[in-house]
Amino acid sequence: MTTNGARNSKVPVVVLTAVLLLVLSFPLATPASAMLTASANHDHITIGFFYNGSTISIRGESDPSEELIIKITAPEEHQVLKQKGKVGGMLWMNVGTLKFERVPNFYAIHSTKKLEDLLSNEELEKYTIGYSALEKHVEVTPVANEQEKSKWFGEFVKFKEDSRVYALSSGKIETKMNEAGRQEYSIQTDWPYQAAPGDYAATVYAVKNGKVVEQTETKVKVEQVGMVKALATMAHNNAAFYGILSIGIALGAGFGVGLVFRGGGSH
């Protein structure tokens, strides 16, 4: 009887010890998960008649021992591009259609150092950071092999860079230590007018010893407002009326210009 009682009395002690260890582990984990912060100073960009792009800055705090990567992306989507080629060895014409799946229409990467100096290829691919990782992630059809895929993906990136919606940079993130011993970081970058309305995610990765040790995210919203929004809604919901209105505006503008030049010629 005594032996069984002793055994039973040990069970609550074991359970209590396990619970205490679990509770004590939470305060140790909480500061680490809260070390990296991020915010955008211009997280709601409005597109009106005189909109010609904007600027945004991403800033926050991190552990002083960590390097940083900032990735700004739009949601992934399906895109179609015309494939150019020479016909008869003379004329450049559309010879086919290339379909790109799982590609963001906006993709910008900024880092404190070159990506290859911060992360292994495996880590870059895991978080889809950099053009090489994005190429692995994207599906391109129709292509005969990986070499052809790489070729057309390269052309796709060039087109996006020329449109200012794809960009890579290193060394432009500014950092400094604050009084609390934390690392403050910030980057200001142009926001191109070519970036379509929608919701964008700015993800900040903290890197240490070749691994992503933490990440956080902030949002940027780009929205049409006023007459621009009304016209875009009309074009989407009533294309026929929008087409007639556009023709009328163009004819009116042409008539007005004609009157100006005619008046100038009579003097």
Image: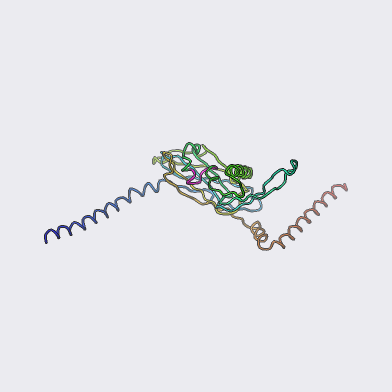
**Outermost residue, right side:** 266
Q: Residue at x 65, y 49 (%)?
A: 81
Q: How many marks?
A: 0
**Residue 217: % across, % down:** 48, 50
- Which image quarter: residue 88? top right
The vertical placement of 4 against 258, above or below, is below
Q: Residue at x 54, y 39 (%)?
A: 169
Relative to residue 197, is residue 239 drawn left or right?
right
Residues rendered magenta in the picture: 124-131
**Outermost residue, front side:** 144
Name the image quarter holding the N terminus: bottom left
**Residue 73: % across, % down:** 54, 49
- Which image quarter: residue 151? top right
Relative to residue 40, is residue 157 drawn left or right?
right
Comparing 157 with 175, the one in front is 157
Comparing 36 with 179, the one in front is 36
**Residue 102: % across, % down:** 56, 51
Comparing 108 with 92, the one in front is 92
Snapshot colouring: rainbow
* Residue 82 is a magenta residue: no
**Residue 89: % across, % down:** 74, 41
* Residue 127 is a magenta residue: yes
